[in-house]
Amino acid sequence: MLFNKKIAFIGAGNMGEALLGGLLTAKLTDPANIIATDIRPERLQDLQNKWKIRTSLDNRQAAQDADVILLCVKPQTISEVLAQLKGIIRGEQLVISILAGITTDTITYALTGKNPVVRAMPNIPAVVQTAATAICMGKFAQEEHRLIATRIFQSIGQVEVVAETQMDVVTGLSGSGPSYIYMIIEALSDGGVLMGLPRDVATRLASQTVLGSARLVQETRIHPAVLRDQVTTPGGTAIAAIKELEASGLRPMLIRAVETATRRSKELSELLKQENGLE
Ligand SMILES: NC(=O)c1ccc[n+]([C@@H]2O[C@H](COP(=O)([O-])OP(=O)(O)OC[C@H]3O[C@@H](n4cnc5c(N)ncnc54)[C@H](OP(=O)(O)O)[C@@H]3O)[C@@H](O)[C@H]2O)c1
């Protein structure tokens, strides 16, 4: 489906490269169909050497001939980038944005006023093709655009389709989520070290435990509470530890973390609009 589509990556940092790398590794497209831009020539040279794609320092030139334009710059530079693209972009070109806090309407109306726009929120495990991405559709995005966007983000992990009003929650849960999980892995490793394990062994055991437990939830689709009960022997070690976790408020703590991050995402989105004079 993507094979003949020309795809322009506007901004090719961590996320841009993870995405184009995902597409090429999954053989969803050919390097000749991809062009990536950046403001640093040496960055573009690296990308060209590694992925054999075309590159350009000129966002307008890159976007001009593309069927799909993927906006992967930082939100702070979006007004400048949209101003560059306005005027050369055509109404039928699909624009996909991964910028946190920038709405589909903002992008649509800063361009032709009728482009199909898909907004996505991936997360950092994209670099190892294990991202959790949520996408939402702009006013003019149709089923074919949803399918294209889904296919692109499936090359770096799993995809959920949500309403745009839910994108702040997505940011608070899966967008920022890796940082919570890194703290959990680090703390589990600390526990292992406290009780006598070497650091490297403790970190490998902690991270594999998180990975394996998550895979079991995904592959069995059994409710996590049922899986927890299955490994909780009466009078055993797990229930003794669970008592500590409950007493220390692990659950409300994580719920509040998602709630707070969601609120902060909303605030930042508003600030971004004001600071960049966006609608
Ligand atoms: N990283 C995440 O976990 C994550 C998760 C979800 C969504 N996102 C979103 O993904 C976007 C990119 O994040 P990232 O982590 O990939 O950031 P990044 O590594 O800083 O990538 C942005 C790239 O765009 C380049 N750039 C700057 N101005 C440009 C311009 N005018 N035209 C073309 N390229 C330009 C930057 O070059 P320089 O480095 O030289 O400035 C950089 O290489 C952000 O909007 C963020 O909200 C990120």
Image (cartoon, rainbow, N blue to C red):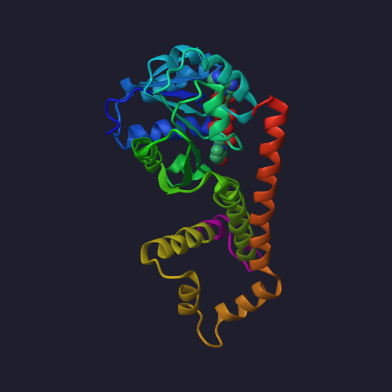
In reply to whether residue 198 is colored magenta, the answer given is: yes
Q: Is residue 179 left or right of residue 212?
A: right
Q: Residue at 44% of width from left, 43% of height from top?
A: 128
Q: Residue at 29% of width from left, 26% of height from top?
A: 30
x, y (%) of residue 126? 46, 41
Quadrant location, the C terminus: top right
Q: Main secondary structure of the magenta part?
A: helix
x, y (%) of residue 253? 68, 63
The total of numbered circles placed on residues is 0
**Res 146 quadrant in image:** top left
In reply to whether residue 84 is colored magenta, the answer given is: no
Quadrant location, the N terminus: top left
Q: In this view, does 67 lie to the left or right of 58?
A: left
x, y (%) of residue 13? 53, 28
Q: What stretch is highlighted in magenta?
A: 193-204
Q: Which of 183 and 175 is in front in this view?
A: 175
Q: Nearer the viewer, residue 61 or 245?
A: 61
Q: In this view, does 260 lie to the left or right of 97?
A: right
**Res 269 quadrant in image:** top right
x, y (%) of residue 73? 56, 27
Q: Residue at 52% of width from left, 35% of height from top?
A: 98
